[in-house]
Image: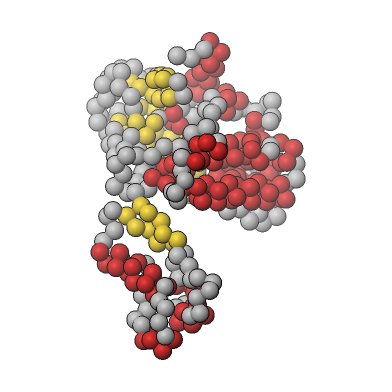
Amino acid sequence: MIDEEEETLYKNYTDWIRDQGAVFDKVSLKYFYVDYRGLMANAPIEKDEDILFVPENAMITLKMAKESSIGIKLKTHEANLIYPNNSTLSTYILKELADPRTPWALFLKALPKSVASFPIFFTQEERKLLTGSQFLKAIDELKEDIQWDYDEICRCAPEFASIAKVEDFMKARALVNSRIFGIKVNDEENDALVPYADMFNFKYQSDMTSWAYSDEREGFVVKAKEDIKEGQEIFVYYGSKPNWSFFQFYGFVLEDNENDEVILEVEFLDFDPLKALKEELLDKKQQPKKIKIKETTNINKFSKAISYMRYMVFDGSANNLREVTLPITC
């Protein structure tokens, strides 16, 4: 259930997107439980039928963000952003939120209020639950990267510091990361935030829908790939990703994910007396900093990974080291 204020917001939001030319007659927003909303069919939908159409003029795109006043400054001052696309889009969203005349007001107000499920916002108690996992380091590295991008944006466009604090930027980044669609418009790569389409929830290996930008129709189209019954929730597939990616950027994990992987970070030990020789024999450019092992990793690649790690910890003589067959980059 949602309160009256929230209900009015979504009615106005729905009216706004329809006024822009969006079409979704057989789809309705539903709150399934607290903090879980999604889109469901309010009538039967046949295979190959359009579920949703959103015209380009109702979308917030990366191209639009790059052409904004701050976007131009980022290019002019050669901003060294770690995540250039998502950070540029996040900057645009925050700038628009601060503008009382923004045409995107209803779209932006309809974005989720809570970001508590994203690990970068975890409390200390929640972080304790991750002790012993690789997630804690990844979370801290992501927070450092976001801080870097924020500082770079403020360097190139000092006025941004008065628009948003780094905490605001982190929230915007979380929302953009979890809601962005990569599209191609007239053969040009672009990223977009698509109203209403961003409310479809994910289902593992779901083949229920397909989505793409249509140059002919000048808009974003979601189609049914199978018959959908009235009252059924409609899902989209976010793609094949490991659990660390789902967890870090979407705030959930899958219990049975065949694309899951373990990331092994490898580097020479500083106190290794053979470190200099190992680096000399093995081109530094060939040294993988991280080795990804999946359940589906073939035996050949796995053997190369083990070979590489054995080479790194080799503690024999220098002469014997020169005779070792160097592992191939894995």
The residue at 45%/32% (across/down) is 198
Residue nearest the observer in this picture, 131 or 328: 131
Q: Residue at x 47, y 46 (%)?
A: 131
Instruction: State the residue in front, 177 or 245.
Output: 245
Q: Quadrant of residue 202?
A: top left
- Give the mark count: 0
Q: Is residue 156 above or below residue 217?
A: below
Percent coordinates x, y for residue 272 in the rendering: 50, 75
Image point (36%, 82%), residue name: 324
Q: Residue furthest bottom?
A: 319
Q: Which x, y percent locates residue 68?
A: 65, 42
Colour scheme used in the picture?
Answer: secondary structure
Asked whether the viewer can see residue 128, the reply is yes
Picture quadrant where residue 231 is located: top left
Residue 34 lies, in percent from the top left, at 45, 20
Identify the residue shown where x is 45% and y is 82%.
281
Which quadrant holds the C terminus?
A: bottom left
Q: Quadrant of residue 108?
A: top right
Quarter of the image with the N terminus in it:
top left
Q: Is residue 288 above or below residue 236?
A: below
The answer to which of 249 and 52 lies nearer the viewer is 249
Using residue 144 as the reference point, say whether residue 215 is left or right of it: left
**What x and y, as percent, mark residue 136?**
50, 47
Residue 58 appearing in the image: no
Q: Outermost residue toward the top?
A: 4
Q: Is residue 120 left or right of residue 251?
A: right
